[in-house]
Image (cartoon, helix red, strand yellow):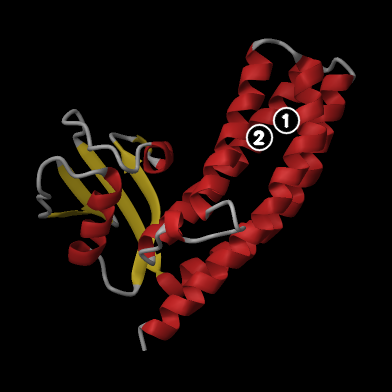
């Protein structure tokens, strides 16, 4: 397996049977500048965000040949990323309602295009959260958002909501899809403000601990 960091091949030979999470944690410790974090992951030429999220605890398959990561300094990542994420969330609230309206008006093709645009905009948001967590060695399972829900559970729940939307679209149940977009998604997106606030707190805490 070949590993590239910022377009430069590195001599990184991890132990066998590492999970994705363990791989990135070890890579950060040994091949990435201490004040840098991961901003993008490409696995065999494809965006690696879904694997980072859905398979974080699973071993990296033997079939993986090339992993490319891109990094920036952590201060820039956290500050710029959190600001952009807040702005993105607000814009997406309006976009999902517009998509719902298109489906209600039987403008299925236009609604589908709008939905795809929303999904594509959400992917980098989820990738940013996981990259930030890896960069600052956050334990998402150990960070509570409420008395009954952890940070990981909230993020995974949001990913589950996205899958529900896709399922409704594939079933061509456009009434259910419109309802979900108009009522559930804005609520889910509003919950991201809490996620970002918690991430900001954890980043600030990590910064204090490093001094």
Does 72 sit left or right of 59 as displayed? Answer: right
Which residue is farthest right? 105
Determine the image quadrant of residue 44: top left
Q: Nearer the viewer, residue 24 or 157?
A: 157
Q: What residue is rendered at 63% in x and 13% in y?
A: 170
Q: Position of residue 102 (x, y in %)?
A: 84, 24
- Asked if marks 1 and 2 touch (Cβ < 8 Å), the reply is yes
Residue 138 is marked as none
Q: What residue is rendered at 34% in x and 69% in y?
A: 36
Query: What residue is pinned by disc 2?
Result: 117
In the image, residue 89 sits, relative to residue 136, either above or below, namely above
In the image, residue 84 sits, relative to residue 58, either above or below, namely below
Determine the image quadrant of residue 109: top right
Query: What residue is pinned by disc 1?
Result: 114
Q: Secondary structure at mark 2?
A: helix
Q: Position of residue 93 (x, y in %)?
A: 77, 45
Does 190 sit left or right of 49 as displayed? Answer: right
Q: What residue is rendered at 35% in x and 55% in y?
A: 70
Q: What residue is rendered at 82% in x and 34% in y?
A: 182
Does 160 sit left or right of 194 as displayed? Answer: left
């Amino acid at each position: 397996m070949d590993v590239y960091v910022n377009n430069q091949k590195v001599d990184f030979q991890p132990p066998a049977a590492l999970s994705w999470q363990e791989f990135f944690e070890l890579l950060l410790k040994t091949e990435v500048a201490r004040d840098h974090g991961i901003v993008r992951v490409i696995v065999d030429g494809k965006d690696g965000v879904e694997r980072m999220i859905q398979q974080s605890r699973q071993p990296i398959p033997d079939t993986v040949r090339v992993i490319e990561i891109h990094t920036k300094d952590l201060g820039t990542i956290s500050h710029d990323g959190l600001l952009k994420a807040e702005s993105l969330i607000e814009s997406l609230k309006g976009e999902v309602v517009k998509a719902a309206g298109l489906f209600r008006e039987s403008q299925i093709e236009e609604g589908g295009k709008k939905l795809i645009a929303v999904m594509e905009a959400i992917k980098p948001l989820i990738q940013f959260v996981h990259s930030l967590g890896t960069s600052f060695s956050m334990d998402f399972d150990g960070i509570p958002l409420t008395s009954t829900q952890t940070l990981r559970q909230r993020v995974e729940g949001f990913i589950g909501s996205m899958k529900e939307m896709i399922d409704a679209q594939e079933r061509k149940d456009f009434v259910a899809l419109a309802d979900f977009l108009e009522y559930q998604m804005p609520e889910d997106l509003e919950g991201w403000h809490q996620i970002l606030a918690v991430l900001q707190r954890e980043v600030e805490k990590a910064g204090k601990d490093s001094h």
